Image (cartoon, grey):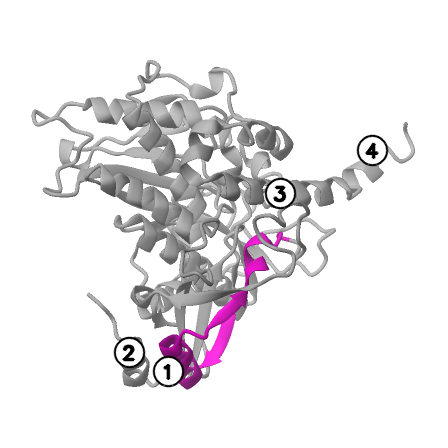
C-alpha cells in the first residue's frame, strides 16, 4: 500500500521529521527537518547529504584509499525517503516522525555501496529466481549502569528491588520483573512506532534481555531492528541506565547475538521451498545450508564487524565457534529448529547484536543463495556438542579481514566497490584499536617484562 507522506504527516500533526540513513556500521545518520520543509524537499527532490556518509568509521573519521569510489571532493547524494518506513518517533516533546531514506546519485542510479541497497540487491537476486526470503531476527542486549569513564568496566544496573544481578538468570520471570518498568516502556514505544516485536525474555547474562521480531520481509525487518535499537537506548536513558548492543560488553557475562531465522518461499504460491511436497528436506534446503557452511566463515566481518565481536565467539559461551549444523542444536552455528514442513527454516546463530542488520541479513541470505544456485552439498549434520569440533571461525577481526578480502563468490554478488569500502573502514578501525595501549598491558607488562 502506497503512503502519501504529506497526508500522513499532516493527519498526525507531525512538526519535525528525522530523515535517517544507516551507515556501514548501522549507525543512524541523516537530517532533522521541520515537517513543512521535509514535505517540500521531498516533493522537489532537494533533500541531500554528502556522499562521505557511507565511509564514516565508528570513530567518526574517514579511511584512505577509497577516492575512486567516493570522490574526495565529497559530492552530494540525493536522499529519497521510503514512504513505507515512516512512523511516529515516540518520546519526543515535539511531535516527530522517523523515515528511512535511500541514497541516489546525480544520474538517478542507486548508491550500490549503501547497506540498505546491498540488501535490496540480494532480494532482487532471489526475486529473479521466483523466491522470496522470510526472516525473523532475535536480538539480545544488556542493560548496564551508566558508565561515564570508559576505562572502568561495565556493571549491571539495580532493578526494582534495589539490588543488581550478580548471577545468571536465564528465562527468569522474577529477574525479568526487576526491569518491568523499562520493558513496558519499550513495548509502549514500539507499539507507537509500529514495530512488530513479539516476546521478550531474560537471557543468560545479568540484566541481559532478548526480543523476538515477528517473521516477515527482510528489508522491513532490518528497518525495524535499526529503529528498535534507537528506541531501546532512549528508553534506557529515560530510566537512568544504558542499553548496549555491544557483542561482549562484560568479560564475565555471555555475549549478545542477533540470531537470524530464515526460510525461502515460492513467490507465486507461498510454498516453503525448503520442504518437498511430501514434507521432507528439499535439495534447495540442503544447498542453502551448504552455502552458509562454506561461505560464512569467509565473510565474518559482515556479521561480526568490530574488534569486540570476536570476544563473544568463545567455546561454551552460547556463541558459535564454527559452522557445524544440526537439528535443534544450539551449540552449532547453523541450527535447524524443530518445525512442521511449512515452517522449515534455518537459524543462523553467528551474527552479533552489534552487526549492521542490513549487512548481516544480506550476508546470511547471499551465502545461502550461492549455495542454492551452485547446488552445493552440505557436510553431515551433527547431533553432539559442536564446541568439541574444530574452530572454523576467525579469532580476531584482523584474521577475519584477511579472509573477507578474498571471498570471490560473495564479492561478485555484493559488488567489489562495496567490499573495498567496507574493508577500508574496518581496516581503519582496526588500526585505531591497535594503537591504544590497554589496561591489561599496563597491569601485567609494565613492571614485569
Distance, label 1 to label 2, CA atoms, is 9 Å
Dot 4 alpha-carbon crowd within 10 angstroms: few under 14, some 14 to 19, many 20 or more: few
| Marker count (numbered) | 4
Distance, label 3 to label 4, CA atoms, is 32 Å
Place of residue 104 in the rendered image (x, y in percent of width and height, measured from the top left):
43, 61
N-term-proximal mark, 3 vs 4: 3
In the picture, measured across the screen, residue 175 lies left or right of residue 217, that is right
Query: Is 185 above or below relative to 115?
Result: below
Distance, label 1 to label 3, CA atoms, is 39 Å
N-term-proximal mark, 2 vs 4: 2
Distance, label 2 to label 4, CA atoms, is 60 Å
Query: Is 28 above or below relative to 306?
Result: below
Identify the disc placed on residue 444. Answer: 4
Q: Can residue 282 be seen in this view?
A: yes
Where the C terminus falls, by quadrant? top right
Q: Residue 431 occupies which quadrant of the picture?
A: top right
N-term-proximal mark, 1 vs 2: 2
CB under 8 Å between discs 3 and 4: no
Say which residue label 1 marks: 14
Say which residue label 3 marks: 424
Identify the disc placed on residue 291. Answer: none
Mark 3 or 4: the one toward you: 3
Q: Is residue 248 visible?
A: no
Mark 3 or 2: the one toward you: 3
Mark 2 or 4: the one toward you: 2
SS at mark 3 in the image: helix
Q: What stretch is highlighted in magenta?
A: 31-58
Identify the disc placed on residue 8. Answer: 2
SS at mark 1 in the image: loop
SS at mark 2 in the image: helix
Magenta residue check for 248: no
CB under 8 Å between discs 1 and 2: yes
Amino acid at each position: 500500500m502506497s503512503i502519501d507522506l504529506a497526508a500522513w504527516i499532516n493527519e498526525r500533526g507531525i512538526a519535525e521529521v528525522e530523515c535517517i540513513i544507516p551507515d556501514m556500521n548501522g549507525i543512524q545518520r541523516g537530517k532533522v527537518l521541520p515537517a513543512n520543509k521535509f514535505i517540500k524537499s521531498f516533493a522537489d527532490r532537494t533533500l541531500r547529504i554528502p556522499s562521505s556518509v557511507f565511509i564514516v568509521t565508528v570513530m567518526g573519521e574517514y579511511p584512505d584509499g577509497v577516492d575512486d569510489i567516493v570522490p574526495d571532493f565529497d559530492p552530494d547524494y540525493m536522499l529519497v525517503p521510503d514512504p513505507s518506513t515512516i512512523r511516529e518517533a515516540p518520546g519526543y516533546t515535539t511531535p516527530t516522525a522517523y523515515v528511512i531514506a535511500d541514497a541516489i546519485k546525480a544520474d538517478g542510479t542507486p548508491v550500490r555501496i549503501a547497506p540498505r541497497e546491498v540488501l535490496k540487491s540480494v532480494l532482487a537476486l532471489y526475486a529473479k529466481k521466483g523466491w522470496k526470503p522470510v526472516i525473523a531476527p532475535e536480538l539480545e542486549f544488556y542493560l548496564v549502569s551508566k558508565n561515564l569513564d570508559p576505562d572502568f568496566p561495565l556493571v549491571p544496573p539495580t532493578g526494582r528491588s534495589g539490588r543488581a544481578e550478580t548471577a545468571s538468570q536465564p528465562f527468569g520471570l522474577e529477574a525479568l520483573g526487576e526491569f518491568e518498568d523499562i520493558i513496558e516502556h519499550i513495548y509502549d514505544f514500539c507499539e507507537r512506532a509500529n514495530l512488530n516485536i513479539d516476546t521478550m525474555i531474560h537471557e543468560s547474562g545479568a540484566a541481559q534481555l532478548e526480543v523476538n521480531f515477528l517473521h516477515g520481509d527482510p528489508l522491513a525487518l532490518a528497518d525495524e531492528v535499526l529503529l528498535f535499537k534507537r528506541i531501546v537506548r532512549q528508553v534506557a536513558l529515560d530510566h537512568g541506565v544504558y542499553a548496549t548492543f555491544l557483542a561482549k560488553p562484560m568479560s564475565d557475562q555471555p555475549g549478545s547475538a542477533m540470531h537470524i531465522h530464515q526460510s525461502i518461499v515460492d513467490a507465486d504460491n507461498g510454498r516453503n521451498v525448503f520442504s518437498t511436497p511430501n514434507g521432507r528436506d528439499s535439495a534447495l534446503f540442503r544447498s542453502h545450508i551448504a552455502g552458509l557452511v562454506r561461505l560464512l566463515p569467509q565473510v565474518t566481518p559482515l556479521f561480526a564487524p568490530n574488534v569486540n565481536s570476536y570476544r563473544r565467539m568463545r567455546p561454551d559461551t552460547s556463541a558459535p565457534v564454527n559452522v557445524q549444523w544440526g537439528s535443534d542444536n544450539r551449540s552449532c552455528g547453523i541450527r535447524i529448529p524443530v518445525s512442521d514442513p511449512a515452517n522449515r527454516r534455518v537459524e543462523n546463530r553467528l551474527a552479533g547484536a552489534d552487526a549492521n542488520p542490513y549487512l548481516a541479513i544480506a550476508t546470511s541470505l547471499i551465502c545461502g543463495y550461492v549455495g542454492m544456485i551452485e547446488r552445493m552439498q552440505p557436510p553431515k549434520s551433527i547431533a553432539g556438542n559442536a564446541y568439541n569440533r574444530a574452530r572454523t571461525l576467525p579469532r580476531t577481526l584482523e584474521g577475519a579481514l584477511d579472509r573477507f578480502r578474498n571471498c570471490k563468490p560473495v564479492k561478485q554478488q555484493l559488488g567489489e566497490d562495496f567490499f573495498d569500502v567496507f574493508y577500508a573502514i574496518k581496516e581503519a578501525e582496526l588500526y585505531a584499536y591497535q594503537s591504544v595501549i590497554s589496561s591489561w598491558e599496563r597491569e601485567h607488562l609494565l613492571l614485569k617484562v
